[in-house]
Image (cartoon, grey):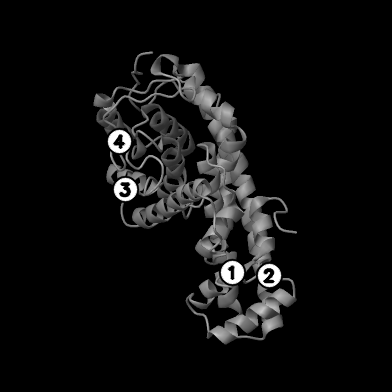
Amino acid sequence: MKPAILKMLPYEDIDWERLISAMSEANRAVARYDGVLYGIPNPGVLLSPLTTQEAVLSSRIEGTRTTLDEVLMFEAGEQVVEGQREDIREVLNYRRGLRKAERAISDRPFNINLLLKLHSILLDEVRGRYRGRGRFRTVQNFIGPPGAGIEEAFYVPPEPGRVAEYMDNWENYYHAQERDRLIQLAVIHAQFEMIHPFVDGNGRIGRMIIPLFLCEKNLLSRPTFYISAYLEARREQYYALLRALDGPESWNNWINFFLEAVAEQALENTDKALGILALYERLKDQVRELTRSQYAVPLLDNLFRRPIFAPKQLIEAQNMPSKPTVMNLLGELKEAGVLQTLREPSGRRSQILALAELINLCEGKEVFS
């Protein structure tokens, strides 16, 4: 196969009338979700586990096999085997990149320099770190079956000498005015994946761009949008539609799929955010009643920020009292069933506790009974 030659953006063959229904539904769903975000006090704290879950699922599309609870257990001090450690590091890098990007776009528009920084963070100390970390590729890459050569490729991206030209056009379109921002985002995501500007990490970076765009274009009040659950559940269809992009029909099929993904995930994000808020309000009253402590709310905030933890991590957190007071508070919450013990202390190994109800809510299933 020969390297792809891509059309420059904007793409002129979008069938706007065909896409009106999907476009309208997606925009309504995103607006409803943004309304919920506005009503959540300190969403950076309350939705923190969902940000980690997005990192887990986006990385899983690329082949990692770790789970949300395993990542949080690792951060609490649980030991893991080396292969699993590599997967977890990829997830933590993804989350770190998302958080850096959120801070960055609050000061200045998204740009290629930020994109390169995010790629550098993504590949920090993990697989692919020696394969052009933080810079556009200078070699020909291709997408195909594991172990196959370029002659068996599903898709061969543009030759490396054209990457800078395509990415300059891509950045210009990112900041251009378009008739509908969600359709613009569908094109931005697909064109990025077709350019495949990095040797490794393209899929994760491409998905990271989605919430950043939604925030920068004022569709969301903050870049807190989790789309990878939908894409991970439909991974084969997701990749097949991207690989098929070669004309008007395939582009309109892709855009329709993307709009459906945004609409469904916006509804799911709304339900989870409301569920987390309801859990927080209920536990706030319960923890205040149980502890009769001025530290009840700061304690709960830290539990939502880090729902699996070692007591030492809570003791060292901001706004926390002395170690004896923290341990007494945790004892009361364990006795009342608010917290669950995942690992008993043994020798130098610390106890690990969990706000199990929050993990189960984020995962959408009973991880801890």
**Residue at (69% x, 67% y) in the render:** 340
Residue under the point 38% across and 13% down = 1
Q: Nearer the viewer, mark 1 or mark 4?
A: 1
Inspect the image, locate mark 4, and give the three-letter code of the amino acid beneath it. Answer: Asn
Residue 341 to residue 64: above or below: below
Residue 303's label in the rendered image is: 1
Amino acid type for the residue under numbered disc 3:
Lys
Q: Nearer the viewer, mark 3 or mark 4?
A: 3
Q: CA distance from mark 2 to mark 3?
A: 38 Å
Nearer to us: label 2 or label 3? 2
Label 2 vs 1, first from the N-terminus = 1
Quadrant housing the C terminus: bottom right
**How far across and down, in percent of the image, does residue 155 sit?**
43, 20
Labelled disc at residue 339: 2
> Amino acid type of disc 2?
Leu
Given the image, on which type of amino acid does mark 1 rest? Leu
Q: Is the C-beta separation of discs 2 and 1 under 8 Å?
A: yes
Q: Residues within 10 Å of mark 2 (few under 14, many from 20)?
A: many
- The percent coordinates of residue 196 (x first, y second) are 37, 30
Q: Is residue 341 above or below residue 62?
A: below
Marks 1 and 3 sit apart, C-alpha to C-alpha, by 30 Å
User: What crowding class fits label 1: few (fewer than 14 Cα within 10 Å), some (14-19), or many (20 or more)?
Assistant: many
**Image: 13 above or below 219:** above
Instruction: Tell me the distance, in whole angstroms, between the alpha carbons under discs 3 and 4.
Output: 19 Å
Q: Residue at x 50, y 19 (%)?
A: 250
Q: Which residue is mark 4?
A: 172
Instruction: Specify which label sits upstream in the sequence, 1 or 4.
Output: 4
Q: Position of residue 64 (x, y in %)?
A: 53, 41
